[in-house]
Image (cartoon, rainbow, N blue to C red):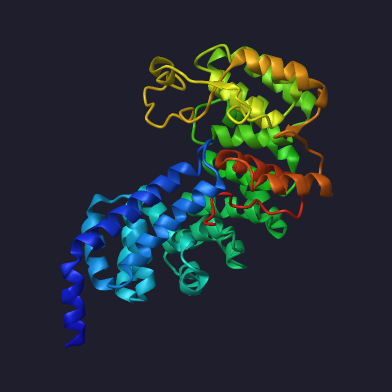
Amino acid sequence: MQNNITEQKANSYRGIYEQYVVDASFLWVLRSVNVKQPHYYLSDLAELELRISDNLDGLMSSFELAWKICLEELVYEQAGETFTAAVIAFRSHDINKIKFIVAHGFTNEETFKGLVSALGWLPKTIVNDWIKKFLYSKDLNHKYLAIAVSSLRRKNPGNILNDILSREDCLENEALLARSLRLVGELKLYSLSNVVAKIVLTKNQTIKFWANWALVLLGEYKRILNLFEFIEEDSELQLLATEIIFKVLPIDQARIKISALSKHPDRMRTIIHASGYLGDPYAIPWLIDKMHHIDTAKIAGEAFTLITGIDLERYNLAIDTTEEIAAVPNDDDENVDMDEDENLPFPDVNKINHIWLRYRDRYHVGGRYMMGIEVSQNTPQTIDKLSALLKQVSMRQRKSVALTLALIGPQLPFINSDAKI
């Protein structure tokens, strides 16, 4: 009787619950976008996560009604709705709901992202047993889910990872194998380096990338030579390859590589990114010149900041742009829906040139700088300064700082800069 009364009362507030579901899903999408943005900071992320939590908590007073509404939203097969439904399912401890949302999570790449994110969001007391079950499941999709969540949470799955990297059926599963290799690098699992070294000879380009990437994180810097091909062709791995290569490659060799790339005008964005990741002040005058060109101005300004630590907006070195300039696409790709330059400031070239002339003596050519900090290999002072930066810089810069820390410290893991606060 009491349950019926409670359910009737909940149904009378259906509109409120619907709004909770819609808002939680939308805010999750907003978060997934903003963790990659150059204008978003930890304080902004904390505020957004609080709003997500408030909406999710609002759904907990009536699991059944919340679940019913979630099911209606899942027809759109999107990441945000999957995230919200997964949080409700796992919080309910209802096995049928959990089985349903896990199956739904494999509908497409977007729903999978939402499912993985939910398992990264929830407390370990709720998800740890499930992750273990998925790891030891006979279903390779379940293993892939568990490895993806382990990567998100930066949790060592244990000896099962060695099995995955050795079993023939797992080796033939590209998604599972790639994410497993990535996890080896993220967690600095040196004991698996020999296993990964065998896999690196594959002809599969995606697997080849992640195997070499992992070995570089494990200190085998010569492996970056195998990543050069990934910066010379347009792919989703191009920027990842560019970043790790130029954070590791010695300055003199990096200059030679950048010079070679400069012979291809269509690689201008890659060259600018590479210059920022390399961190050599030698490139600053050239970057300032590129700020004169509308199509490269913003990313050249971003590279300038990545090297010098001089924030364009904080020091009034940016200008307001007209709608015509703001609408310039970031490259020749017809699909400009996700413009990586959109939230970057437009540099005031004259002011930047003056401030560089004023402060350039603080930087020595041939050094390697990250946000104004000279990077030395595995020195406590450098590690302390970069660690402090993680709490101060934008979300996009946090990713770059985190990778630098992982590369200079043999025992430092590659932290997940996107993780829930």
Residue 356 or 248: which is nearer the viewer? Answer: 356
Q: Position of residue 20 (x, y in %)?
A: 29, 59
Which part of the image, by quadrant, shows the N terminus? bottom left
Q: Quadrant of the C terminus?
A: bottom right
Q: Residue furthest bottom?
A: 1
In this rendering, is residue 243 above or below 65? above
- State the residue in front, 241 or 26: 26
Q: Residue at coordinates 45% horizontally, 57% vertically from top-left?
A: 50
In the picture provided, is 211 more to the left or to the right than 248? Answer: left
Instruction: Please say whether residue 263 is visible from this viewpoint.
Output: no
Residue 231 sits above or below residue 118 on the image = above
Query: Picture coordinates of residue 38 (x, y %)?
Result: 54, 35
Q: Nearer the viewer, residue 219 or 401?
A: 401
Is 25 on the left-hand or right-hand side of 202?
left
Viewer can see residue 85 = yes
**Is residue 57 toward the left or the right of residue 276 in the image?**
left
Residue 99 locus on image (x, y percent)? 33, 69
Q: Residue at x 28, y 54 (%)?
A: 22
- The residue positioned 49% from the left and 63% from the top of the image is 146
Kindly indicate the quadrant of the structure image that contains residue 258: top right
Identify the residue at image location x=56%, y=22%.
Answer: 318
- Left or right, 274 with reference to 124: right
Residue 84 percent coordinates (x, y): 34, 59
Nearer to me, 98 or 348: 348
Kindly indicate the quadrant of the structure image that contains residue 30.
top left
**Count of numbered labels shown in the rendering:** 0
